Amino acid sequence: MGLKNTLHNLKEKYKGTKMAPAFNAIHTFLYLPNETTHNGTHIKAADDLKRTMNTVIMALVPCLIFGMFNAGYQHHLATGTIEAAEGFFSYSFWSIDNLVVGLWKVLPLIIVSYGVGLVIEFIFAVIKGHEVEEGYLVTGMLVPLIVPIDIPLWMLAVAVAFGVVIGKEVFGGTGMNILNPALTIRAFLFFAYPTWMSGDKVWVHGAVETAGTPDAISGETILGTLAQNQEVSHSIADMFFGFIPGSVGETSTLIILLGALFLIFTKIGSWRIMLSSVLGAIVMGLIFNLTVDSGWITESSKFYGLMSTVWWHHLIIGGFAFGVVFMATDPVTASQTNKGKWIYGFLIGFISILIRVFNPAYPEGVMLAILLMNVFAPTIDHYVVQGNVKKRMKRLKAKTA
């Protein structure tokens, strides 16, 4: 109670000053707001926007922890400390060293992401005199999970500043942005520093530098391998459970599925968007498979590797599952109508696989697909609403005729 009372007293002391939003943000982040309703009819609920954001973070934490473990696991595989053949139940597989190595690489990304983003949020809150907005609580966690693990920290800081200021604050802050802030940050990195965001290679390990030994080795992702028409050495189980090279939070489809169920259970994530995105990806994957089976595309084609990939494999490789569950469902930038969510999600899945196959510079498509559909989400909702109005007008005319 001491901390709560202290924060409450500070909030009251600085009430009406420019620093009030800062103290109020800390107080309401840790504790429920003190304000209560006294008259009139009100909608009462146990949650608020901060609690909603915290729920999403809880769904992301397992992805973060597993991502750290897998980064260390890939490190030890690359250095030969352990062998993949030792198996899932071996002592070396579950060694705490795997988590320590991953923590050592990922923790700085988290610190920079939250540090830069929240400082900018506080600055804008003080300047504009409004409350500190909660949207960056989730964005700050998403960013370290979708960027290359070896990205320079200064580069990440610049991208976060761009994403928060240009991607959100210029539109009016949380709830007013038209693009997903985390994907805006990743898109900035992709276009500003393409050599770091090519998407075909990822950091595997940082070995101690010795004569003739690099301090980092880039390992091929599965999408990078397929884009070069090469055979993938990883098993389906490795792809599903996540024991493969890739961005921190995107490798384990199993963990992502658990997060999806949690978001659906708490009614925060839209199951319509998730399901329709999967259906869109399946349709596009089947079209490519049929194209290959018909003989229109031969093995000599540079697109053969990804086009011939079994349709359902597209769902468990790359960042598709993570993007669909945690970013396509963003309630601010996604479609708001139920019918619109089906259209919005289907097009995300469909376009994701389309870009994944045909974009030679970036063998992944979910980021660009979601950003594209963020732009068209209001248009989709507009036509859905207008369609409903026309149907009602027709029924009204039929009754009055």
Image: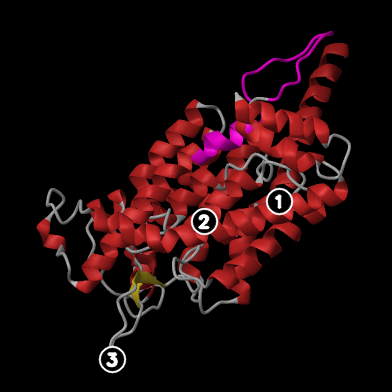
Tell me the residue at 69%/55% (across/down): 119
Q: Where is mark 1, residue-wise?
A: 376
Q: Left of 177 or right of it: where is 70?
A: left
Question: Residue 214 location, x and y as percent?
Answer: 33, 84
Q: Is residue 353 visible?
A: no
User: Distance between the Cα atoms at labels 2 and 3?
Assistant: 32 Å
Question: Residue 53 location, x and y as percent?
Answer: 59, 37
User: Does 274 sit above or below residue 181?
Assistant: above
Mark 3 or mark 2, which is nearer the start of the sequence?
A: 2
Q: Left of 19 or right of it: where is 189?
A: left
Mark 3 or mark 1, which is nearer the start of the sequence?
A: 3
Q: Left of 81 or right of it: where is 284?
A: right
Mark 1 or mark 2, which is nearer the start of the sequence?
A: 2
Instruction: Estimate how packed mark 1 is, as few (under 14), some (14 to 19) or many (20 or more) residues with alpha carbons within 10 Å.
Output: some
* Kind of residue at badge 1: Phe
Q: Is residue 75 visible?
A: yes
